Image (cartoon, rainbow, N blue to C red):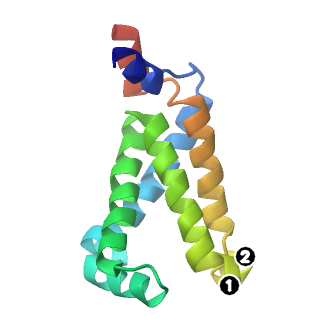
Amino acid sequence: MKTLVKKMMATDTGLGQLAIRVPVGIIFFAHGAQKLFGWFGGYGLEGTGQWMASIGLNPGYLMALLAGGAEFFGGLALILGLLVRPAAAVLAFTMIIAILTAHIGNGLFMSNNGYEFGLALLAASVALAISGAGRGSLDAVLSRAS
C-alpha cells in the first residue's frame, strides 16, 4: 500500500507543472463552487441538478454533486499540489463527460458554447496526471519525506 501511495505522489521536479496546475486548479475550484454552493454567480446544487437532468444526466442532483465535488476538491488538490495524479485523472474524466454531454453538439468555439474550453482543461488535466504536481507541491514534499 505504501508503494501505491508513493507512486501516486511521485512527480517530476520541474516548474512547468506549477505553471499549469495553479491556474487550472483555480478554474476548477471556482466552477465546482458554482455547482455546489452557488458562489461566483453559480446556481448551486439545486439549479445545476435541474439543468443536468434537462440534458439527460440523471439523477440531476447526484450528477451535480459528483461534477461539483470533482471540480471543487480536484481544483483544491491541484492548487495545493496534493495527490495531483489521481485528482487530475478524475478531472480529466469529468471534462470528457462535460464535452460529450453539454458541448460537442455546439462545435469547437466557446462563442457557441462549444468544447474548446473543456478540451483545454482536459489537456491540462491529462498532462498533470502523467507528469505529477512538480516543484512547489505537497506531493513533492511528501514524496521526499517518505
Which residue is painted at 28% across and 75% down in the image? Answer: 38
Q: Secondary structure at mark 1?
A: helix
Observer-nearest of 3 and 139: 3
Which amino acid type is marked by label 1?
Asn
Q: Position of residue 47 (x, y in %)?
A: 31, 85
**Mark 2 vs 1: CB contact within 8 A:** yes
Residue named by callout 1: 112
- Lateral position of residue 135 relative to residue 39, left or right: right
Looking at the image, which residue sits at the far bottom? 54
Which residue is painted at 34% across and 16% down in the image? Answer: 2
- Lateral position of residue 113 relative to residue 137, left or right: right
Query: Which corner quadrant holds the C terminus?
Result: top left
Which amino acid type is marked by label 2?
Phe
Q: Position of residue 8 (x, y in %)?
A: 45, 27
* Picture quadrant where residue 4 is located: top left
Label 1: how many Cα within 10 Å (few below 14, some 14–19, many 20+): few
Q: Judge whether 29 appears above or below 140 on screen.
A: below
The total of numbered circles placed on residues is 2
Which residue is painted at 33% across and 51% down in the image? Answer: 73
Q: Secondary structure at mark 2?
A: loop
The answer, for residue 136, to whether it is visible in the render is no
Which residue is painted at 52% across and 22% down in the image? Answer: 11
Q: Judge whether 14 appears above or below 87 on screen.
A: above
Residue named by callout 2: 109
Label 2: how many Cα within 10 Å (few below 14, some 14–19, many 20+): few
Q: Judge whether 111 appears above or below 9 on screen.
A: below
The answer, for residue 18, to whether it is visible in the render is yes
The Cα–Cα distance between marks 2 and 1, rounded to whole angstroms, is 6 Å
